[in-house]
Amino acid sequence: MSSSPLDQAPLGRDVAYPTHYDPSILFPVNRETNRAQLPFIPNWAGADIWHAYEVSWLNTRGKPMVAMARFIVPHNTPHIIESKSFKLYLNSFNESQFNSISSVQHHLEKDLSAVAGGHIKVALTDLHEIQTIQCAPLEGLNIDGADVDIEHYQPNAGLLKCTTNPQPVNETLTSDLLKSNCPVTGQPDWGSLQIQYKGPQIDQESLLKYIVSLRQHTEFHEHCVEKIYCDIWQACHPEFLFVYACYTRRGGLDINPWRSSEPLVFEPTRTPRQ
C-alpha cells in the first residue's frame, strides 16, 4: 500500500487540541515534491502571506490576551507549513503564559522559521492598535463577465491563448472564480486571483476557462499559484509576470501566495471575502 508524507499530517484526522504551548505540532511539507511536477522551475520572487485572526495567550497573571498576526514565508524556504498543524500550533498558545507580546512574537518567529527552513517574518498586533482594515476587490480588469462555455474542470494549460494583437500590452486581470481543493480532505478552497503582466496580450476568455479548469484540482494554495504562473509563462512568454491569489479564511487563517518574475515591494490586499 502506497503512503504519502501527508499521511502523518494532522489534516484530515481527528486530533486533540493542545492544552499547552507545543511547537512540535508544526508539520512541514516539502515544496520540491510538488515543484517536480511543474513544467519548469522559474527564477522567480515571491512569498506566502498568512493572516491569523485567532491568536491568544495568557499574560503572567493569567489574563487572556488577543492579537492578529501576519506571517511572511519566503517562496524559497524548503518547506511550507501544513495549515491544520499551523492552526493547532497557534491554539497551543491559548492556555500558556508569556511575559509580553514580543515574547510571543519571538517564539512564533523561532518555531516557524525552524520548520520552514528559512526566516519567517512575523507581525503580531494587539487588537487595540489596529486601525480600520479596508477590504476591496483586487485592482485590475475583472474577466468573470466573459460569455464563455465551460467544459474543463481539471487543469488544462492548453486552454491558454494569446490574441492576435501584435503590440505588447501591460495590463492587470482579475478573477473571483478561482477554486481548488485540499489534497487531503477534498474541502473546497475559494480564492480571488490577480495577474499582472507585460508582453503578448492574453486572450481573456481563454484565461477564464483556464482558471475555471482548476475547479476540481487538488493541491495546496501555494502550489496552485505556482502552477498558474508556470502555465501562463509557458503559453504566453511575457516579459514580466505577477500572480497573486487571496484565499478565503479557514480555521482562523487565510493564505495569500504571490510569485513574480521580478522582486517587488509588495503590500497585500484584503478582499471582501476575507
Image: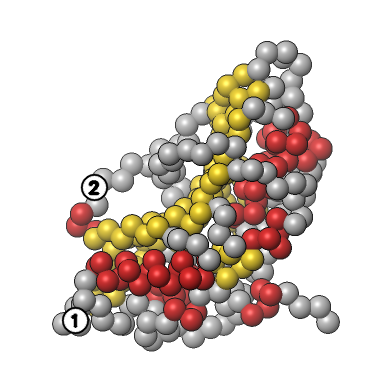
Indicate the amino acid at tag 2: Gln
Query: Residue at (26%, 81%) from the top-left corner?
Result: 97
Looking at the picture, does residue 242 appear above or below residue 147? below
Which residue, given by chain and number where applicable, does mark 1 sit on?
A: 60
Look at the image and tell me in which quarter the N terminus lies. Answer: bottom right
How many labels were placed on the picture? 2
- Near-viewer residue (2 or 264): 264
Query: Residue 175's mark?
Result: none
Q: Who is closer to the viewer here, 216 or 162?
A: 162
Residue 185 position by quadrant: bottom right
Amino acid carrying mark 1 in the image? Thr
Separation of marks 2 and 1 at Cα, in angstroms: 27 Å
Whole-percent x and y of residue 116?
52, 66
Whether 195 is drawn above or below 60: the answer is above
Inspect this view and state whether residue 272 appears.
no
Residue 89 x/y as whole percent:
44, 75
Q: What secondary structure is found at the residue carrying circle 2?
A: loop
Place residue 235 in its image quadrant. top right
Near-viewer residue (47 or 176): 47
Left of 68 or right of it: where is 255? right
What secondary structure is marked by label 1?
loop
